[in-house]
Image (spheres, rainbow, N blue to C red):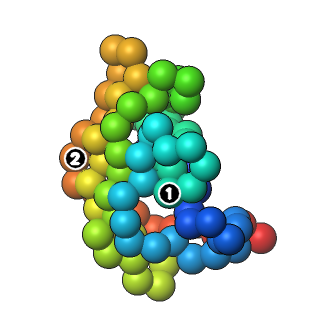
Amino acid sequence: MSLSLIGEEGSNDKSAAKAGTYAAKSDKFMKAENVGVVARKNGADIKSWLDRTTLTGEVKLSSVANDEIRGDVDLSSGEMSIKGAFSAKVLKRK
């Protein structure tokens, strides 16, 4: 799973993630913007992206520590959806 989250007003791509709710329908800040799912079938990656123009739902980050986040995701777009608890390493841009 790949998530692109927009943080609080005044933050940028170098700012650390913060616990909170990131809604798909937020205007500018605290927003879940891009969601992709990668699955493996017969040794090949199958990539699916939820359409950001019809994206609904939210991502709740319950814990943010160093390079790991934990939370719950409940997002959908058309017939595609992703829902459940997760923990993930944060990838930092160079």
Residue shown at the point (31%, 48%) measured from the top left:
73
Q: Nearer the viewer, residue 53 or 91?
A: 53
- Mark 2 neighbour class, 10 Å CA radius: few under 14, some 14 to 19, many 20 or more: few
Q: Please tell me whether residue 1 is drawn above or below residue 50 in the rendered image.
A: below
Does the image show residue 43? no
Q: Is residue 58 left or right of residue 72?
A: right
Residue shown at the point (41%, 46%) measured from the top left:
23
Badge number at residue 13:
none
Q: Please tell me whether residue 25 is drawn above or below residue 87 in the rendered image.
A: above
Q: CA distance from mark 1 to mark 2?
A: 19 Å
> Which amino acid type is shown beneath numbered disc 2?
Gly
Q: Nearer the viewer, residue 56 or 50?
A: 56
Circle 2 SS class:
strand
- Residue furthest out toward the top: 79
Q: Earlier in the sequence, mark 1 or mark 2?
A: 1
Residue shown at the point (66%, 71%) measured from the top left:
11
- Mark 1 neighbour class, 10 Å CA radius: few under 14, some 14 to 19, many 20 or more: many
Contact (Cβ within 8 Å) of mark 1 with mark 2: no
Quarter of the image with the N terminus is top left
Q: Please tell me whether residue 48 is drawn above or below residue 26 in the rendered image.
A: above
Query: Which residue has dot 1 on it?
Result: 30
Relative image position of residue 59 (x, y in whole percent): 36, 51
Query: Which residue has dot 2 on it?
Result: 84
> Which amino acid type is shown beneath numbered disc 1?
Met
Circle 1 SS class:
loop
Q: Tally the numbered discs.
A: 2
Relative image position of residue 75 (x, y in whole percent): 35, 36
Q: Is residue 18 left or right of residue 80?
A: right
